[in-house]
Image: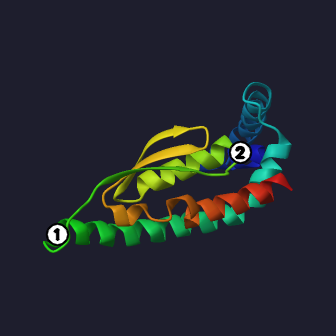
Amino acid sequence: MMALVLFALWLVFNGKVTLEIVLFGIVLSLAVYAFCWKFLEYSPKKELVALRILPQGIGYFFVLVSEVIKANFVAIRLIVSPKYEVEPVLVTFRTDLKTDLARTVLANSITLTPGTITVELTDNEYKVHCLDKEMAEGMDESVFVKLLRKMEQTAGK
């Protein structure tokens, strides 16, 4: 699959299709694929796992975008409105996510969401700075954690 994607990218970047370009693209795509397999610990098994969780990953992306939009409105309301008193807070919580990838995606998702920044990630423990204490509520069981947990379960099957 990866070799086909590399080949397709080769064709798109070249902008035209000739016999030379196709043959060189096949050789180059297979060489890059072999390099990834040997030196980057890539394997067809990992490719199948990635394909299996692709629909959930696309769903995760749309949830992330909607959460970022909602958090933008909350942050704007906190900053602009004179009746709200902003109370920044540093929250520490743990998750049961098993893979480094899922933990990193969670940390990045938190940081991408306006009003929150992941300050530290050690093992399963997160330290997150929140613009207001209201934003810190339920962070350990957020929609991000639930979706990443499902993705880990699907990948493990």
Q: Which residue is mark 1?
A: 80
Give the colour scheme shown.
rainbow
Is 28 on the left or on the right of 94, as rendered? right
In the image, is residue 142 above or below residue 101?
below
x then y, percent, for residue 127: 46, 45
82 or 46: nearer the viewer? 82
In the image, is residue 114 above or below residue 1?
below
Question: Is label 1 in a helix, a strand or a loop?
Answer: helix
Q: Which residue is mark 2?
A: 7
- Amino acid at circle 2: Phe
Q: Quadrant of the C terminus?
A: bottom right
Could you classify mark 1 by the number of other residues whose Cα lies within 10 Å: few (under 14), some (14-19), or many (20 or more)?
few
Could you classify mark 2 by the number of other residues whose Cα lies within 10 Å: few (under 14), some (14-19), or many (20 or more)?
many
Q: CA distance from mark 2 to mark 1?
A: 50 Å
Q: Earlier in the sequence, mark 2 or mark 1?
A: 2
- Amino acid at circle 1: Val
Residue drawn at point x = 17 percent, y = 73 percent: 81
56 or 17: nearer the viewer? 56
When asked about the image quadrant of residue 82, the answer is bottom left
x then y, percent, for residue 92: 47, 48
When asked about the image quadrant of residue 14, the answer is top right
- How many numbered marks have been drawn onto this rendered protein structure? 2
Is 112 on the left or on the right of 35, as rendered? left
Looking at the rendered image, the disc whose residue lies closer to the viewer, 2 or 1, is 1
